[in-house]
Image (cartoon, grey):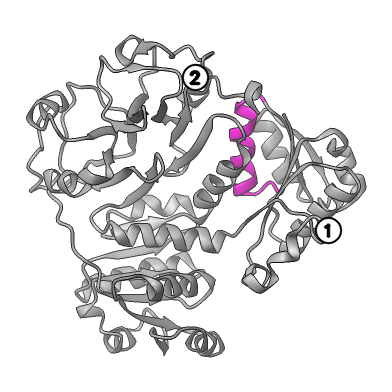
Amino acid sequence: MKIVICGAGQVGWQIARHLAGERNEVTVVDNNPNLVRRATDTLDVSGVVGFASHPDILDQAGAGDADMIIAATHSDEVNMVTCQVAHSVFKITRKIARLRAQAYLQPVYSDLFRREHLPIDVVISPEREVAAATLQRLAAPAAFDTEYFLDGRAQLLGIVLEEDCPVLDTPLRQLTDLFSTLRAVVVGVQRGRRLFAPEPRDQLFAGDRVYVFAHVDDVERTLQIFGKTTVRQERVVIIGGGNVGLSVAKALETQPRRVRAKMIEKDRARAEAAADALERTIVLHGDGMDAEILSEAGIARADAVLAVTDDDKTNMLASVRAKTTGCPMAIALINDPTLATLMGPLDIDAYINPRATTVSSILRHVRHGRVRAIYSIGDGEAEVIEAQVLSTSPIAGQAIREIDFPEGVLVGALVKHGKVVRPRGGTRIEVGDVVAIFALAADVPEVERLLQVSIDYF
């Protein structure tokens, strides 16, 4: 498959890495020569320096015979014009654009991106994706990371193990025997800076950050086994009234169970606009790091604080202040993935990386083959791949213990005959099964080879 990616920033680079690793022919376009050089030096891709919306630049990038274009520059307007040029001049059949301005996404303008107007097949809104991820974190307050798989029937949970965790120092093999009916599998462990796929003899220790695949019906029991309690989030304070904060507040207002939300926004005009757009949410004008305004928002009685301004340091410091004031849970929006290591020492319960969220969303829409979903863990350190097993796949017809998976790979869950089952060594993977696999980044190409999900099925 021939793909042109416009924009070589973090989002564009990550998408290029994934698609080039699947033996697609990828060309990256950016007007910053340093970003293009970084992509061509580190990835198996071609690069063109120039403005993505210019027809001659797209022509140099091979748009004339490209199958898909992904417009992920920092400018909404450039992304839209790029897709228009790709359609009108080069007849590219599939066009994906990242758009941030919410004005373009209002339902009243839904016809804007039809073929006869601005021909964009898939619009990705980072703010909406981040808002959805924030709500998922809020729904699983005991987990620092979470994502749904297998049509919402299995859930990946990131859990920090505390000193009072009842299963510390217990080999995973023994856990399987103790909780034989529990449909949950520990697929990843982060110990310090090292992330690895555990073996049956491995034990868990206090401070470990573990990734567990669980059937949705067993999530609460799984959390209890790992020493976590499920608490309903009834009072929430949102710091930041921009697109993300506004989207989260609107979503909370539409939830079946009542959530009392208060928003703090530093910019007066933005605060007034948020107050006009929201019905039940109380909007306060002030600095989210100010102790007095936090007290006015009732932070000591809140169940959670969501720090979602456009400044990472503000989000981190506001989260820390909220926790020291008595709020039991803090979720911070962090754009710089290198700051993720500070979340634990600062006692921030969960963070959301907009870039990783956007990349995962775009990749879900890119794939036409048997890969149904991809979720990026940490700063691209590992991935969870959900895919349907093909007749040509080397793993079809084999028991899991017979498959030569790399050391950094574990099967987290699978669907057989429409039913989600817990994978065991003797479980045989058959054609048509859907598998969710945890894989360290270095092992992803081998997993894709075993699944046979690359170019033959696009």
Main SS category, magenta section:
helix
Can residue 69 be seen at all in this image of the molecule?
yes
Q: Which mark is residue 116?
A: 1
Question: Is 89 left, or right, of 379 in this rendering?
Answer: right
Task: Using a 10 Å C-alpha cutoff, classify the residue at mark 2 as few (fewer than 14 neighbours), some (14 to 19) or many (20 or more).
Answer: some
Give amino acid for label 1.
Glu
Q: Earlier in the sequence, mark 2 or mark 1?
A: 1
Q: Nearer the viewer, mark 2 or mark 1?
A: 1
Can residue 211 be seen at all in this image of the molecule?
no
SS of the residue under disc 2: helix
Residue 99 on image: x %, y %: 66, 61
Residue highlighted by disc 2: 446
Range shown magenta: 6-23
Residue lying furthest front: 417
Q: CA gap, disc 2 to disc 1?
A: 42 Å
Q: Where on the picture, by quarter, is residue 306?
A: bottom left
Residue 378 on image: x %, y %: 41, 44
Residue 438 on image: x %, y %: 38, 31
